Structures are given as structure tokens and as C-alpha cells.
Amino acid sequence: MTSAADPTAVNSRGRVIVASLIGTSIEFYDFYVYATAAVLVFPALFFPNDSPAAAQLSSFVTFGLAFLARPVGSVLFGHFGDRVGRKTTLVASLLVMGVATFLIGVLPTFGAIGVAAPALLAVLRFTQGIGLGGEWSGAALLATENAPRSRRAVYGTFPQLGAPIGFILANALFLVLSLTVDDAAFAAWGWRVPFLLSAVLVIIGLYVRLRLVETPAFRRTLETGTRARVPVGRVLRSSWPQLIRGTFIMVATYVLFYFMTTFTLTFGTAAHTVAAGAATAQAAGKPFDPATFQLGLGYLRNDFLVMLIVGVVFFGVFTPIAGVLADRFGRRPMLLVTTALIAVFGLSFQPWFGSSAGAPVVTTAFLAVGLALMGLTFGPMGALLPELFPTNVRYTGSAIAYNVASILGASIAPIVAVLLWNRDGGILGVGLYLTGAAVVTFVALLLTRETRDVDLVEAAVAEAAAAP
């Protein structure tokens, strides 16, 4: 193995691909395990004294805590990523996320320790967010700072592919468990298995990442002595316009994804009639209040998970396609077209998805189109956001933009969706919310310069020459 201290050492293309892909796959697997559990089991196990609707909202609040933590993680890990290096910081972020996820898997429920259970769940969820806050940016920099300039967007899609891969792994495992164990066993211990298995995945990820060497662009920063002493301060002073634009560029992406996964799973599996809702609540021994009950599509949980996994396959297929298009036509033109399509797609929520009860082909088509758009908008972000920032604050700047956008776009998206979801099953407001987010992103893209032709290593040299 080539020493990381060797200034001539380089990461092979295969090592870059595997290390950036496997790390984010593990991180997003951990993250989506929680998202799925927040819909399927956490309301009953950690918030059992609330009404069903209130329990679901409480579960989504803990889900959103991680997004509040992610900017904290971006500042913490961004500091060390820009000061110490990409490799060490990536290893640390993976450990933080993995340990928090494993501990959720052994956490006692409300029935065992009372209110301490949801409190500890919230703490561990916050810790998950800190780990993920440092993960994405480091993986994106690992890919793009090792890439040929003409293929940087393609390389940047490898960490992006971790999102659909992690989602499919997490939900497929939940699906297998729900098919092989009964509801009582699933609620008692089955839901813990995906959390505990994260330990195995983390070990694999650590093995791959510990074999990396530093990227050429960061090594050039070391050679020229241009590291920022306090990267977050430097970003806020000199790169705040890029921070603002980068944040709003990501907003529609976040809203789209969490609507297409977390909200659709909730709406898709909610009872289609009040009578069915009352029967379900009675069978589960829960109180039923028709005044707070919200109609959905009425699919069985396992059936909808299968449709959702099919949709996420389109997410995975269109992510690398987006990288090819962004390298050929530029990040900005490609994303402007995609964002306009997302705005139009938001208008289809009510007539398409809201009216698809009993029509699984129609529902699956909706999920496939929405998640294909997700691949097209998410794919180029692995290149675009890092390209907005100078080398010595690239980790911090791209991480803050990416994770602050998660607060604006993702942390409140499932909660807003539940509030905009009418009791009679109407979701017009949910779609309009997505359309509004797309308009915000479209404006941010119009105000952003094209970055396709920037050479990251040459930029590091120019930055050093311009430094006082």
C-alpha cells in the first residue's frame, strides 16, 4: 500500500470510486434506516401516549433533529477536513454516524424506561446528523479532486449514488424482515436488525478509507502553506455569496427527495377510508379520533415499499446520466432544465399521486418519475457545490451549503407535508410547496456562474499566488 505521506502518491480510479461510493452508501443506509423506522415503528414504540397523528408528528420531529445537527457537523468536520485533510476527516465522520446508529439498535423503548427513551433517541439522532454533516462533502471532494477535469461531474456522481444504494439496502432489509417475522416480533426486535447490521458495514467502509491518500488539490494547499487557520471564519468573510447560492441551489433537491420517500410512504400506507382507519387502530389497540384522521391511498406497507424501491432504482440510474450531461453541457444549463421540470412535477401531486389509490402501476409511475428527477438534480451537486469554493475552505464551504439546505429543504419537509395534507386526502398543497421550492432553486441557479471548466489544482496554485 502506498504511504499517505508520499507526496507523489495518487489514488487509483478504482479506489476513489469505491471509497467515495461505499462510504456514502453506508452513511445513507444508516440515515434511511431511521427514516423508515420513523414511519413504521417509532410512533408506537417511543411515543405511545399520543394520538396516532401526534405520535407520527413527534416521530418526524426526531427525524428532523438530524438536519439541525448537520450544519454543526459541517463546521466541525469541515474545519478538520480543510486543516488536517480529507482522508482523516472522512474516517472520523463514518465512525460517528456508525456508532450512533448501532446504539439506536440497542435503545430501550418507552415501555422499558419511559420518557428517557424518546430523549435518548433524540440525542442519538442528533449525533447521526453530526456524522452525516461531515460525510457528504468529504466524499464529494475525494471524488472531484481526484477526477480529470473533463469528467469531474461523472466522478462527483459516485458519492451521490450512495443515496439510492443506501435507501434500497435499508428498505429492502426492512421489507425482508416484515415478510419473515410477524408484526409482534417486528415491533419487539425485528426493527433493530438494520441498525445493528450497520456495524458490519462501517468496518468495511473504514477498511477502504484507511487505504486512501490525500487529494492532489489539498496536497497543493499544504505545499503552499495556504491552509485557513479558521476555515469557517474564512468562508463567512470571503465566500458568503457562494454559501447563499449553494444553499438555495440544494433546496428543491431536498424537498423533492423527502417528499418522494418519507411523505409518500406515510400517505401511501394511510387508510383510504375512515372505517379502515378505525379498524386498523382498533387492531393495534390505539385510540382513534376521526377528527384528526387523514385519508391516504391505503396500500399495505410491504406493497408500497416494493413500489418505492422500484422508484429508487430510477433515482440510481439517472444519477450517473446527470453527471454525463453536466460534463457535456455544463452544470448550470442542465440543472436549470431539471429544476423547471421539478416545478411542473409538483403540480401533478394531486391529480396523479393523490388519485392513485388502488392503481399500483399509476403510483409506481409517479414514484419513478419523481425519483428520476431526483437523480437528475442530485447527481451534479457532487461537482457543483465543491467547485463554488476555494481549495482551502472547500470542505467547509460545500458542507455548510449542503447541510444548511437540509434544514430549509428536508428537516421540515415531512412535517409541512403532513400539515398540508388535508383530512379528506387532498395533497394539492404538498405539490405546490415543492413547486415553490423549485422556483427558489431556479433563481439561485440563474445567479450562479458556470464551473465546468475550472481546474481545481490550477485554482489552488492561483489562490496561493494571490494570498497575502
Image: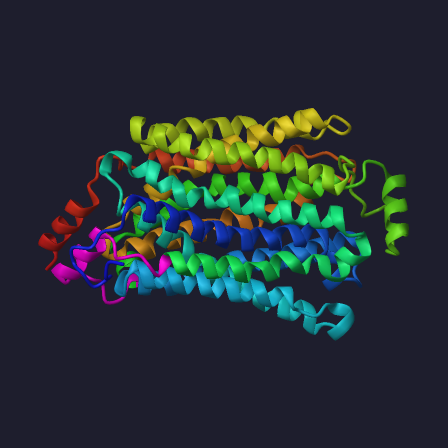
Whether residue 75 is visible, yes or no, is: no
Image coordinates of residue 51 in percent, x first then y, are 80, 56
Q: On the image, which quarter does residue 383 sit in? A: top left
Where is residue 198? Give x, y as percent: 55, 59
Q: Is residue 121 above or below residue 465?
A: below
Q: Position of residue 44 (x, y in %)?
A: 77, 58
| In the foreground, 224 or 72 | 224
Residue 65 showing in the rendered view: yes
**Closest to the observer, 275 or 25:** 25
Q: Which residues are magenta?
A: 209-232
Residue 461, position in %: x, y?
A: 13, 50
Looking at the image, is 141 positioned above or below residue 88? above
Q: Indicate whether residue 191 is drawn in magenta.
A: no
Q: Residue at x 56, y 60 (%)?
A: 65
Q: Quadrant of the N terminus?
A: bottom left
Indicate the quadrant containing the C terminus: top left, top right, bottom left or bottom right. Answer: bottom left
Q: Judge from the rendering whether residue 386 lies leftward or rightward of residue 55; answer left or right.
A: left
The quarter of the displayed image where residue 360 is located? top right
Write the residue at 32% across / 51% down.
Answer: 142
Judge left or right: residue 209 versus residue 218. Answer: right
